[in-house]
Image: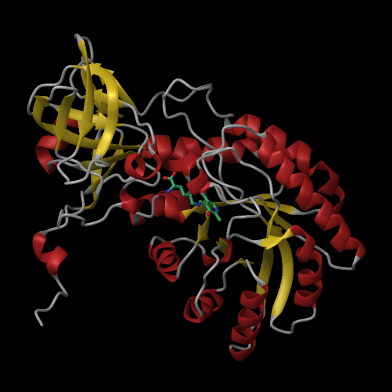
Amino acid sequence: MARPAPFAYRADQLHCEGVSLEALATELGTPLYVYSRGELEGAYRAFDAALTGLPHLICYSVKACSSLGVLSVLAKLGAGADIVSGGELLRWQRAGGDPAKVVFSGVGKTEDEMRAALAAGIHAFNVESAEELTVLDAVARAAGKRARVALRVNPDVDPETHPYISTGLKQNKFGVAMDEARALFRTAAGLAGIEVIGVDCHIGSQLTKTSPFTDAIARLVALVQQLASDGIAISHVDIGGGLGIDYGKGDAPPPSPAEYGVAVRAALAPLTALGVTLVCEPGRVIVGQAGALLARVLYRKRSEAKHFTIVDAAMNDLMRPALYGSFHPIWPAHGADRPTIVTDVVGPICETGDFFARDRALPELARGELVCIGATGAYGAVMASNYNTRPRAPEVLVDGDKYTVLRPRETYDQLLAGERLP
Ligand code: LLP
């Protein structure tokens, strides 16, 4: 059964679960990130249920939304974590996450980060190059440990997504080429500081079909079978993250987690007898629909060519439209039932790329009105910056008719702390 939408109108007032967004914005100011605990938990459970029957570990991709509060909710549900830095490892541990369920991805891990992850006892390093393997071996031996490793291969499949978030093509910087992988596994198997346990790939993000996943898995399956004939036993297959969400643009919706689960299960079937564990690294599909960015309308104006609605959130709060031209739904917090107007919703930053919507038909908004920019739980707050010396927006977690401020609004003193005059 479909979950109830986390953001819905009640008596013409937009709510997150049981909390009125106008009440939240009046209390905490705007811009403001709001997350629904119910949606977060529901999305995690749906993904987990989709993999029922397959031995699996869900390593939530921390980069999608790394607030300690969000991580703690997921850790309590039994999630593991996909991290890409020492900072993300620290966050996961501070949030009460289990380091034994962590996989460490990324093309550029430093030796310090490797040492910290070894000391924490993470589940596996997703190693992306021969040189990284050599360094990890040395770091592990110096620490008197063996690093568990999955080699990330580049399956060279087209994920058919935005070029900036496509990672599994041979021209991308990620992973080891398929035709070099087998030899590198043999090398790895002979290193005293390395224990080879898995193969890994991640082909891209916001995928809207299952076929790129199943094509990539087919290549991993063939590799695992070759490795078995080389005497290298693989116990875990990590297929990365990447399942897309519906941003409401009107395109065909991406496969549901259940459909994804069916496709993944079929593609992995040849390995059932080998007893491998499936590792997944979902980010967006867990947290994307759980979050929204609230902003207030500052001004309206009409130029010769266009109508603009200027709000108090900007590209420093939500970079996705500027960076990828991404679409996000925009809803007025008070009833949408009124005449529409075609407008560009823009922020106050001095760049033409500072927009949230272009030529969008929206209910005509008044100065001071609250708007909600939807599907911004993933890659929203985490990608915020202080550009234009704008303090970062607070983050709030709603649970039923209560809420917790996960992070208060950054103050100017915090923003300037640490800076020195020459
Ligand atoms: N695993 C690895 C190795 C990754 O690089 C990523 C995302 C994930 C898992 C999680 O992918 P997801 O399930 O969230 O698609 N900032 C961009 C997305 C960048 C994705 C980077 N890697 C955006 O706003 O669309």
Q: Can you say whether 19 is above or below 347 in the image?
A: above
How many marks overall?
A: 0
Residue 364 on image: x %, y %: 17, 17
- Residue at image x 28%, y 52%? 384
- Residue at image x 43%, y 62%? 92
User: Can residue 276 be seen by looking at this rendering?
Assistant: yes
Which image quarter: residue 264?
A: top right
**In the picture provided, is 344 more to the left or to the right than 235?**
left
Q: Nearer the viewer, residue 141 or 108?
A: 108
**In the picture provided, is 328 more to the left or to the right than 246?**
left
What is the basis of the colouring in this image? Answer: secondary structure
User: Can residue 20 be seen by looking at this rendering?
Assistant: no
Residue 322 on image: x %, y %: 32, 42
Which image quarter: residue 181?
A: bottom right
Residue occupying the far right of the picture: 229
Position of the C terminus by quadrant: bottom left
Residue occupying the far front of the picture: 304
Residue 112 on image: x %, y %: 47, 81
Q: Nearer the viewer, residue 249 or 8?
A: 249
- Residue at image x 13%, y 67%? 416
**In the picture provided, is 11 more to the left or to the right than 181?**
left
Q: Can you say whether 209 is above or below 365 in the image?
A: below
Q: Can you say whether 365 is above or below 295 in the image?
A: above
Residue 54 on image: x %, y %: 72, 44
